[in-house]
Image: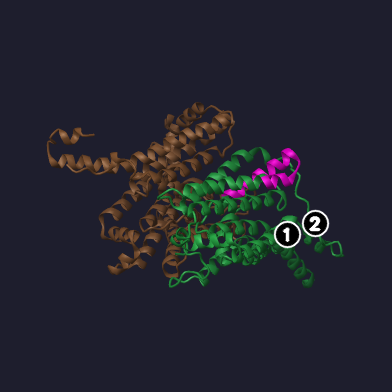
Amino acid sequence: MADTTASAPPSAGLAESLDRLRRSSEFVVIPLLALVASAILFGLFLLAVGKNPLTFYSLVWTGGFGTAFSWQNTLVRASPLILTALCVAIPARLGMTVIGGEGALVLGGFAAAVSAIPLVGVLPPVVVIPVMAVSAVIAGGLWIGFVGFLRHYRGINETISSLLLTYIAYSILNFFVEGALRDPSDPNKPSTMPIGPDYMIGSIPGTSVHWGLVAGLVCAAATWVLMNRTTFGFAARITGGNVRAAMAQGLPVGRLIVISTALAGAFAGLAGFFEVGAIHGKANASLIAGYGFTGILVSFLARHNPLAIVPVAIFLGGLAAAGGLVQRRMGLPDATVLVLQGLMFVVLLVSETLYGRFSIFKARGT
Amino acid sequence: MDDVGLSTVLLAMLAGAIRVSTPFLFVSLGECLTEKSGRINLGLEGTMVFGAMAGYAISYETGNPWLGVLVAGFSGTLFGALHGVICGLRLVNDIAIGIALMLFGRGLAFFFGKDYIQPVAPRLPAIEFGWWASDPNLAKALEINPLFLIGIALAIAMWWAFRSTRVGLIVRTTGDSAPAALALGIDVKLVRLLATAAGGFLAGVGGAFLSLFYPGSWTEGLSSGQGLMAVALVIFARWNPLACFGAALLFGAAGALGPALQSIGITRGYHFFNAAPYAMTLVIMILSISPKRSLKGAPGELSITK
């Protein structure tokens, strides 16, 4: 305790940065503690249903991170999680809880497929693929931007509206996929026409991981820069801190909210583009995979920090990737991962109450 | 020909309004009670799904569907109490914890419900009010579950209790202004905890209706957001239990429109009709909320309308 202050610090600068490090470590230590606590609680849950928690965790390790193959599987699942988590993290900076990333992902994927179908075979992939990406981004951006618009100009709670819009998005997808846009040659699962292998996005060379991962990393980094190093981000944070103060400062609060939510939705739409363009090759109900909802957890675990989202998304992607292995080897239902995710989310939110409680993280005068 | 089609659709919507509205009614009364105390519980979706699973499982294991309803209610109370306790902690946001409990409840329901997807459990009986009708469709439409009637009685009782009992006054004061409640010597946290737990009970019962009466089996896609719609439904009903009943009927009828049209061969807009309750909720919110004023009748402490 007293040793840092007692022994003469080599320089005031070093002591100060150590102090800063200690204070900011609170935001790493508490979520980590929450993760450990939820792992223990989940272990007890497994014991209660007669399964061995150690087997479970070792299988999660093998299935998620143990081999090159499982790593690739993990990263494929992490990439939409990074993008849908950004869809939560950006509005969170403005003090909004948007949970409709799932709907933006679904519509983004749908828009990508729809815009590609008339162009396939007419124009080369170099043209069509960007068109798909742009359509997805626009669809997602308009969808969540509308949520921001309603919040600011109509006073409608963004959590509720974004959730309602998610169910509407599901219906739009199902309506077209089972109706006007259904591929008649596929009797098994209602889908749009396939875009064809030539028009699909390939993998990063040497891996089976598609380019969505790179896009996710770039988007996360760009968001961090935007939110922490630009006047836009500064204004957004002021708005998140206190809307009235922001308005009194003459900040264009409405525009900030709409642009931020549109950007957030654009990222989720992009995730949908990669799901269609790199994995499914067509739009169908497989797009409704819950990435949007897991993205909420990712963003909260990362405390809405765009850079922290990346490792958290990889961690949860690994958990999801290991789900199948756990299911086969331990005879557990596929919802096991869902239970663990839910438990982690609950424990994490409970841990929020611990902030500022430990003197070890407090600033100390030298 | 057209007449037959129209009467079939109207009958199906009537039947739908009666059947589909019951879970809406219970979960929205639960949400109404919670919101009246100044807190919002988005986790009722998870509570409903878990209640549906628990009710079905208990009914299958014991052969008594009413025991299933009771257990579903008590499991809902546990979820509500968990929400209530966690929200009582400092710095914890009630909307976020609701989302978390929604995911957790669904996860647990799917985990334990895996074994109950196939078996057939005894279902809740219906009272046949349609014995006088010659039209079999009408008779079918008037098969009413006792829970529907209990729900109506409950809505009236809650409306009366909020208006003219001491307990109702305590809940309303807590929801309108925590400082005022404190000044009256009310334990704000305790009132909210109890209101959330009781709300969870009702949501659990609503879930049990889904698996034990209509549609009447346990599947993972059983409740597609009905618990969430309850939040909007309560706003739509302006925090009035009697209006919750009307709104639940309306939502039930809207939800029944798609299947009703399908039954007479109109299948085109099926998925849009599925989305009707969600779209309707959104439109109603857009029309009735304005940034200048908070909603009439809204509890003052409620985070979503502040």
Callout in the foreground (2, 1): 1
Q: Residue A281: where, in percent of width, then height?
A: 51, 49
Residue at image coords 54%, 35%: A324
Residue at numbered disc 1: B149
Q: Residues within 10 Å of mark 2 (few under 14, many from 20)?
A: few
Q: Residue B226, located in which quarter of the rendered image?
A: bottom right
- In the image, residue B156 lies in the stretch drawn in magenta: no
Tell me which colouring the rendered structure shows: by chain
Q: Nearer the viewer, residue B79 or A259?
A: B79
Pointer 2 and pointer 1: residues touching (CB < 8 Å)? yes
Mark identifier at residue A262: none
Foreground of the two, B112 or A323: B112
Name the spot of residue B261 as percent of width and height, x first.
70, 64
Give neighbour class at mark 1: few <14, some 14-19, many 20+ (Cα, 10 Å). Answer: few
Residue at horizontal 50%, vertical 47%? B85
Q: Is A215 rendered above or below residue A40?
A: below
Q: Chain of mark 1?
A: B
Q: Is residue B25 above or below residue A73?
A: below
Q: Position of residue B18 (x, y in %)?
A: 72, 61
> Is label 2 on the same chain as label 1?
yes
Question: Left or right of B235: which side holds B202?
Answer: right
Q: What's under tag 1, amino acid-wise? A: Leu
Q: CA distance from mark 2 to mark 1?
A: 10 Å
Which region is colored magenta? B46-70
Compare marks 2 and 1 and give the one earlier in the sequence. 2
Q: Residue at x 71, y 53 (%)?
A: B214
Which colour is chain A painted?
Answer: brown
Q: Which hue belongs to chain B?
A: green
Pointer 2 residue: B127
Residue A157 drawn at (x, y percent): 47, 62
Q: Label 2 sits on what residue type?
A: Ile
Position above or below: B100 against B277 = above
